[in-house]
Image (spheres, rainbow, N blue to C red):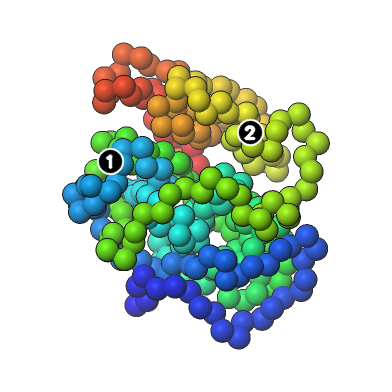
Amino acid sequence: MISGVTAVFAGEPEGPALPGLIAEPNLFPTLVNPKCSRCKDEAVRRQLELRPDDRVLAWIRGKYDGGAIPARFFLVPYCVISDTYRVFVYDADAGFMQGFESSLDFRFHGYHHGVMVIRHKDGTLYSALSGRGLTGPNKDKRLHTVPTLATNWGDWTHRYPDTVAYDMFPKYQPKELPTLSVESSLNSRIKSKEPLKDEDWVLGLEHAGRARAYPLYVNNTESHVWTDRIGDEDVNILWFGPTATAVAYVSAIEGVSDTVQLVIDQAVPQAPGDRRLNGDRIGR
């Protein structure tokens, strides 16, 4: 089994050219199948280096009831992780982290219209944001996304200490989140016609064949719930201020025809300085 190595693909097909692509496959290494541990164990192992406000890419479904990846240790130096559990990506310039179906065959490739591009071993180039094949053998096919969210290490380990983490061997040293944009990412962007500025934060949602962007105010420590209707389904948009976490859920309980409305319950006891949104996690 491959464990914790940098991906090197030799002799794979190049695939057709993609207008607007800036290819820099050697800009970031790709981490392949790192060894797993538990959040509570890594919290002890690296207690002097992991900070409560460390950003993590987290998930709550699947094997081991979920897990978390500290960005400074893994997703900043290796912005693509090809794993037997998931493929995880982090585009610091576009401001998103997310996961796709498991594979050992992806690596970082470059930027297209301001969004990171990942490359499969068969030569297909995919958008790391939408998962859509941009060019190559599987053009226009979509990678299966998995539910993830961006939150803080301290809050996550308080709630889910038994979830999985990567074994933080000494070779994984923290690297601060970037404050400057990658030049190739900037140069590949198209000019926005929207009233929002390029640096404004939004929650992007694609559902039922439609896409929308919901502006976020990252300095707002309050929590909010919005409802919207996309196609023929209601959705709940959740903003959790203490950890600057934004997620969207379909407003339907699995296996039940009724829809639900989520509200903030300030009476639920939580960790100091924390608020939790009342209601089950019900989306896909």
Q: Is residue 119 in view from this perspective?
A: no
The image's mark for residue 226 is none
Q: Is the residue 199 above or below the residue 129 in the image?
A: above
Give the left or right position of residue 111, taking residue 272 as reference.
right
Q: Nearer the viewer, mark 1 or mark 2?
A: 2
Q: Secondary structure at mark 1?
A: helix
Quadrant in which residue 237 is drawn: top right
Quadrant including the N terminus: bottom left
**What's the residue at 50%, 33% (across, down)?**
246
Q: Amino acid at mark 1?
A: Thr
**What's the residue at 36%, 54% (across, down)?**
174
**What's the residue at 36%, 14% (across, down)?**
266
Q: Which residue is mark 2?
A: 200
Q: Is residue 230 in view from this perspective?
A: yes
Q: Which residue is mark 1?
A: 157
Is disc 1 surrounded by few (<14), some (14 to 19) or many (20+) residues within 10 Å? Answer: some
Quadrant in which residue 144 is drawn: bottom right
Q: Amino acid at mark 2?
A: Asp
Quadrant in which residue 235 is drawn: top right
Q: Position of residue 44 (x, y in %)?
A: 18, 49
Q: Position of residue 195 (x, y in %)?
A: 76, 29
Q: Secondary structure at mark 2?
A: loop
Q: Position of residue 53 (x, y in %)?
A: 36, 37
Return the residue found at the far bottom. Answer: 11
Q: CA distance from mark 1 to mark 2?
A: 29 Å
**What's the residue at 40%, 57% (across, down)?**
74
